[in-house]
Amino acid sequence: MTLRKGDFILIDYVARVKETGEVFDTTIEETAKKERLYKEGEIYEPKLVVIGEGWVLKALDESLTTMEVDKKTSVEIPPEKAFGARDPEKVKRVSLRHLTAKGITPSLGMRVEYNGKMATVRTIGAGRVLLDFNPPLAGKTLAYEVTVQKKLRTKKEKMAALIHRRIPAVEESKFKFAIKEKTVSIEMPEEAFYLEGVQVAKRGIALDIQRFFPKITTIKFIETFKTEPKTET
């Protein structure tokens, strides 16, 4: 099965720094726990990618058309196609006292915000702290192991995946929707009503649907509040 630009696919991956073998990102819960990357509240599941949309690193995106469903593929991405080379000019020494005055107690490897920019603490000593403002993965070769789990084929499958991408905290199957010519009506499950940022998510869903299905001109979100029937006393 050939994959091409514009295809909707679900991928699992494990991403490592080639030089050290350290895993820095994954969609697989078991791997996240094993590598001590697991974050409570994070959702580990295959990631929706529309090939060519830039939803993953460009070099990884370009390699997806060479992959096959259900077959693990290794992709190596050199620094210039990932996060660039390390720039020694972006490494600065600052006073430890200056950081503690801002309420920061630095530790090795910690990410801190300094003068509006994020940096990594590289060394601490003699009242000075070495801050590295390069992206954490700058200068690294990235090694991805990717499995395309599924290619989505129907309009309904694709729309359900777009909704789930924006509201991952609620099971995909709980959203009911109907497609009629130029209109899509999406019934919101009650547990989605009060989620933080749900209005922004709905706006994103509407924009996504109109982008990928330009014939759709109207997207309706239906929220139905049900009251419990009163019992006679």
Image (cartoon, rainbow, N blue to C red):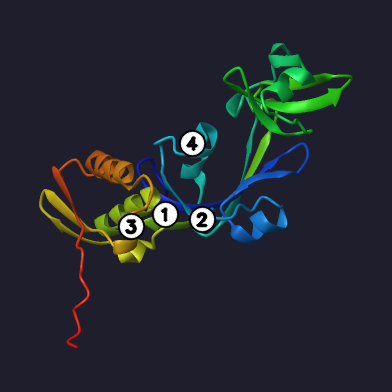
The amino acid beneath tag 4 is Glu
Kindly identify the residue that appears in the image at 20 percent across and 70 percent down.
Answer: 227
Up the image or down, 5 lies above or below 178; here it is above
Kindly identify the residue that appears in the image at 51 percent across and 57 percent down.
Answer: 45
Q: Residue under circle 2?
A: 43
Q: Nearer the viewer, residue 8 or 93?
A: 93
Q: Residue under circle 1?
A: 168
Q: Residue under circle 3?
A: 192
Up the image or down, 37 lies above or below 114; here it is below
The quarter of the picture where residue 137 lies is: top right
The amino acid beneath tag 3 is Ala
Q: Secondary structure at mark 3?
A: helix
Spatial CA span between label 4 and label 2: 25 Å
Alpha-carbon neighbours of circle 1 within 10 Å: few (<14), some, or many (≥20)? some
Kindly identify the residue that appears in the image at 42 percent across and 54 percent down.
Answer: 168
Q: Residue under circle 4?
A: 62
Q: Nearer the viewer, residue 35 or 201?
A: 201
Spatial CA span between label 3 and label 2: 16 Å
Q: Nearer the viewer, mark 1 or mark 3?
A: 3
Q: Nearer the viewer, mark 3 or mark 2?
A: 3
Q: Position of residue 83 (x, y in %)?
A: 61, 27
